[in-house]
Amino acid sequence: MRLGRRQDPGDEAIAELRRLGADALADDVESHRPSDDFEIQGERAWGSMRLFLAASTQWRVQIVAGLKGSRVLHLGLDYTALEAIARMARIDITPDAFDDLQTMETVALAILNEHR
């Protein structure tokens, strides 16, 4: 199955940041948007990816301000919301799916928090 870029609900938030004059922060948020297609193989991988995508709006973040500007620091997924999200999306959270989710989260955190 091939998936492409989903419509990003962050468009309004980025526009609001720019309206407030936080262009550097808006640029940082915008630079972390996914842009490439990807392919998923296998039923286990598909279930795990569905869980990760369903939880993609549940990142815990912190705004870090410093002398060189501010940036968003991603802390991890909000696991307290995970069960409700999975239930509403009709996704089973198996031990394997949760392990896969944590692996994807670890990789995503490294990418999202890399300094530019």
Image (cartoon, rainbow, N blue to C red):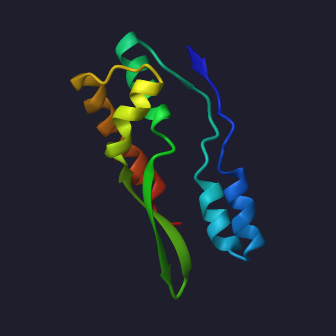
Residue located at (66% from left, 43% from top): 8
Q: Position of residue 27 (x, y in %)?
A: 67, 64
Residue located at (40% from left, 11% from top): 42
The furthest residue to the left: 95
Relative to residue 100, is residue 90 drawn left or right? right
Closer to us: 13 or 4: 13
Relative to residue 14, is residue 111 drawn left or right? left
Q: Position of residue 35 (x, y in %)?
A: 64, 40
**Against 57, is 95 above or below?**
above
Quadrant in which the N terminus appears: top right
Closer to us: 82 or 63: 82
**Against 10, is 93 above or below?**
above
Residue 17: quadrant of the picture: bottom right
**Against 11, is 35 above or below?**
above
Relative to residue 109, is residue 66 drawn left or right? right
Q: Position of residue 33 (x, y in %)?
A: 61, 48
